[in-house]
């Protein structure tokens, strides 16, 4: 399966590049679901450091090519079981981001499957903090639209309360906040345990969103 995924992602690299270029021009573009990793690589290729907020077991950092990697999560057991030995684990909530890091501390701030766990108002506060800490870019990944989740911890590590979904996001919600958006068609489906928990194994796959905002930080290193 890993070889197949690698093959499909390599095939997805050209459409990923086209989608990123189109989203920069028009605000919203579409891409196949396996384009996520190629898109994230494109968004990080000019970055030397990254903070991954809500990192969980650090799956998002596992394949990152960024030199300095920091994974922040409020649930300590996730970090104890992290998959990346050479990334820095930081046990703290997302709300502490600007207390822990000065403006422009890292090139890139990522939040993969995180935004939907905030209430809409809290999400705006988090985005403002992330944009302050990032010197170059903030990158997000979130389900598109309604994706109910009351407390399903796919890792079975006691983080159910942190896994509840509290907001829904459409492309326009993010473009209004200055983000470029790529819609990943049919990203979530029966291969995802959270999807099965929410919709059932026979439900139609749902789209996901990858979005980013380039920031101009006066303290860019």
Image (spheres, rainbow, N blue to C red):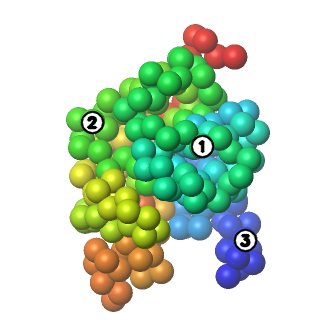
Secondary structure found at label 2:
helix
Compared with 192, 165 (above or below) is above
Left/right of residue 37 with respect to residue 188 in the rendered view: right
Residue occupying image coordinates x 44% and y 22%: 99
Q: Nearer the viewer, residue 101 or 189?
A: 101
Left/right of residue 116 with respect to residue 134 in the rendered view: left
Q: Which residue is mark 1?
A: 89
Q: Nearer the viewer, residue 190 or 15?
A: 190
Residue lying at the far bottom in this picture: please name it.
Answer: 202
Choose the circle earlier in sequence order: 3 or 1: 3
**Quick one: label 3, few (<14), some, or many (20+) residues within 10 Å?**
few
Task: Give x and y (percent) for residue 193.
Answer: 41, 77
**Quick one: label 2, few (<14), some, or many (20+) residues within 10 Å?**
some
Question: How far is the residue under mark 3 from the one under mark 1?
Answer: 27 Å
Choose the circle earlier in sequence order: 3 or 2: 3
**Label 1–label 2 contact, CB within 8 A:** no
Q: Which residue is mark 3?
A: 6
Position of the N terminus, as image quadrant, is: bottom right
Residue occupying image coordinates x 60% and y 56%: 82
Task: Kindly tell me whether residue 199 is visible in this rendering.
Answer: yes
Task: Kindly tell me whether residue 26 is visible in this rendering.
Answer: no
Choose the circle earlier in sequence order: 1 or 2: 1
Question: How far is the residue under mark 3 from the one under mark 2?
Answer: 36 Å
Task: Give x and y (percent) for residue 75.
Answer: 43, 50
Query: Residue 118 is drawn in which quadrant?
Result: top left
Residue occupying image coordinates x 61% and y 12%: 219
Question: How far is the residue under mark 1 from the one under mark 2?
Answer: 23 Å
């Amino acid at each position: 399966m890993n070889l197949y995924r690698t093959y499909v992602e390599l095939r997805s690299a050209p459409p990923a590049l086209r989608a990123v270029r189109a989203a920069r021009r028009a605000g919203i573009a579409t891409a196949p679901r396996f384009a996520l990793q190629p898109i994230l690589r494109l968004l990080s290729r000019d970055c030397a450091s990254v903070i991954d907020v809500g990192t969980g077991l650090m799956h998002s950092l596992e394949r990152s090519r960024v030199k300095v990697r920091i994974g922040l999560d409020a649930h300590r057991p996730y970090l104890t079981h992290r998959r990346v030995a050479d990334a820095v684990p930081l046990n703290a909530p997302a709300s502490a981001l600007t207390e822990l890091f000065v403006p422009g501390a890292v090139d890139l701030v990522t939040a993969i499957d995180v935004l939907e766990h905030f209430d809409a108002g809290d999400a705006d506060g988090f985005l403002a903090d992330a944009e302050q800490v990032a010197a170059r870019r903030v990158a997000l990944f979130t389900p598109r639209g309604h994706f109910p989740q009351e407390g399903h911890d796919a890792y079975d590590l006691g983080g159910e309360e942190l896994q509840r979904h509290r907001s829904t996001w459409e492309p326009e919600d993010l473009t209004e906040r200055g983000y470029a958006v790529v819609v990943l068609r049919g990203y979530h489906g029966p291969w995802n345990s959270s999807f099965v928990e929410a919709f059932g194994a026979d439900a139609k796959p749902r789209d996901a969103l990858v979005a980013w905002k380039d920031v101009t930080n006066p303290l860019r290193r």
